[in-house]
């Protein structure tokens, strides 16, 4: 059975994962949502104006009412800067399976933050939420995303041709990855617990 905690605060070595607030709107727009270099790897188009980001943020804030909603802002512990987002979605009661997605502002790419955030969410999802399987897919022309999936222990299960059509109406082949709870816990044992600190009172 899945155990829901909503979106609790999670601390890693260098990052704080937590709920967004309305005051994050401008930084989310500036740091990744308005940037084609980020949105080209996602399904939705870059935001043209901060009002689009505000609308999106308002939807996220109201979704926090549900304890099944897992959508984290990623901030640097040292500076408090908002650098990206990561979420668990499409959680299926019947199977305990779900998807994960993430984005970071371009300025913070290739510093290991994506891997650190993904590992934290995988640990939280398996150890605390009791999820059965976490999956993700990346465009085959976005190998950095596949690399962080691998570093988080996910395994490529195949490639789906023309799996998505992006905002520029280009079809993209996607590599699909997954990791099972059983494999994760067998491999990481108790050591995984030390990857993150979770504040369960954050709701
Ligand atoms: C995908 C993303 C979150 C990765 O975050 P990140 O913080 O840069 O990731 P990390 O620094 O932890 O790791 C990146 C890895 O990809 C590798 N990499 C980067 N560019 C690469 C490329 N063109 N080809 C192959 N590997 C690449 C890096 O070398 C690194 O691997 P290494 O540690 O073995 O050297 C970030 O690039 C991003 O936000 N992209 C845009 C949005 C997006 O793609 N979201 C996911 C949709 S599926």
Image: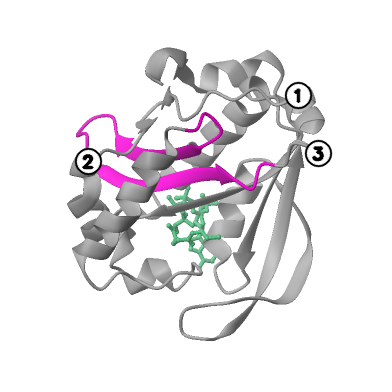
For the C terminus, give its image quadrant.
top left
Label 3 CB-ligand 1 distance < 8 A: no
Up-down relation of residue 78 to residue 51 (above or below): above
Nearer the observer, disc 3 or disc 2? 3
Residue 88 painted magenta: yes
Q: Which residue is mark 2?
A: 81
Name the colouring of the figure: one colour
For the N terminus, give its image quadrant.
top right
Compare marks 3 and 1 and give the one earlier in the sequence.
1
Calculate the distance from the C-alpha at mark 1 to the C-alpha at mark 2.
36 Å
Mark 1 burial class by Cα count in 10 Å: few <14, some 14-19, many 20+: few
Calculate the distance from the C-alpha at mark 3 to the C-alpha at mark 1.
9 Å
Compare marks 1 and 2 and give the one earlier in the sequence.
1
**Where's residue 149, x and y in %?**
62, 49
| Residues at discs 1 and 2 in contact (Cβ within 8 Å) | no
Calculate the distance from the C-alpha at mark 3 to the C-alpha at mark 2.
36 Å
Does 79 sit left or right of 201 as displayed? left
Q: Which residue is mark 1?
A: 1
| Residues at discs 3 and 2 in contact (Cβ within 8 Å) | no
**Where's residue 71, x and y in %?**
46, 40
Mark 3 burial class by Cα count in 10 Å: few <14, some 14-19, many 20+: few
Q: Which residues are magenta?
A: 66-91
Q: Which residue is mark 3?
A: 95
**Where's residue 137, x and y in %?**
65, 60
Label 1 CB-ligand 1 distance < 8 A: no
């Amino acid at each position: 059975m899945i155990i829901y905690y909503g979106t609790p605060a999670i601390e890693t070595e260098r990052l704080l994962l937590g709920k967004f607030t309305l005051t994050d709107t401008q930084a989310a727009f500036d740091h990744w949502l308005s940037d084609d270099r980020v949105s080209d790897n996602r399904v939705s188009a870059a935001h043209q104006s901060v009002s689009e980001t505000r609308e999106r943020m308002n939807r996220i804030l109201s979704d926090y009412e549900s304890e099944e909603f897992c959508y984290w802002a990623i901030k640097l512990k040292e500076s408090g800067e908002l650098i990206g987002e990561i979420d668990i979605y499409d959680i299926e009661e019947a199977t305990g399976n779900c998807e994960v997605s993430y984005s970071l502002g371009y300025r913070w790419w290739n510093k290991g933050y994506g891997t650190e955030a993904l590992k934290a969410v995988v640990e939280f999802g398996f150890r605390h939420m009791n999820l059965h399987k976490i999956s993700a897919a990346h465009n085959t022309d976005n190998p950095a995303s596949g690399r962080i999936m691998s570093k988080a222990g996910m395994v490529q299960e195949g490639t789906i041709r023309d799996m998505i059509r992006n905002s520029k109406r280009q079809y993209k082949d996607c590599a699909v990855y997954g990791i099972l709870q059983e494999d994760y816990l067998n491999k990481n044992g108790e050591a995984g617990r030390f990857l993150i600190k979770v504040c369960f009172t954050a709701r």
